[in-house]
Amino acid sequence: MTQFRTLVWRELADAREKYPTPFCSLHEAYAVLLEEVEEFWIVVREKNQSEEAALTELIQIAAMAQRAAEDLQMVPR
């Protein structure tokens, strides 16, 4: 498993522990993903961009996309 994938799985596990209730709709999943993408956009617009901050946001985006697909039963867990 690649390092990025490992980080995504850890983030997903942490999110499920912190927020155990699954997404109940595409609308909810969209809202969560939009928030994560907006946080990434903030990092992108900074003059002194932090690669670490950008990577953190990308991991969160990927984890929430995975969670949406699983919670909404689009892919098997």
Image (spheres, rainbow, N blue to C red):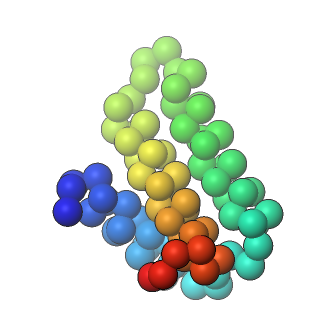
Query: From what the image shows, is residue 34 above or below residue 76?
Result: above
> Furthest-right residue in view?
27
Closest to the observer: 23 or 16?
Answer: 23
Answer whether residue 37 is visible to the viewer in this image: yes
Q: Is residue 3 left or right of residue 18?
A: left
Q: Residue at x 43, y 37 (%)?
A: 54
**At which x and y percent is residue 11?**
41, 65
Query: From what the image shows, is residue 2 above or below residue 47?
Result: below
Q: Is residue 15 left or right of residue 24?
A: left
**At which x and y percent is residue 69?**
57, 69
Q: Residue at x 29, y 52 (%)?
A: 4
> Furthest-front residue in view?
75
Q: Residue at x 69, y 64 (%)?
A: 29
**At which x and y percent is residue 46?**
52, 21
Q: To which quarter of the image does residue 65 belong?
A: bottom right
Q: Quadrant of the C terminus?
A: bottom left
Answer whether residue 71 is visible to the viewer in this image: no
Q: Is residue 14 left or right of residue 31?
A: left
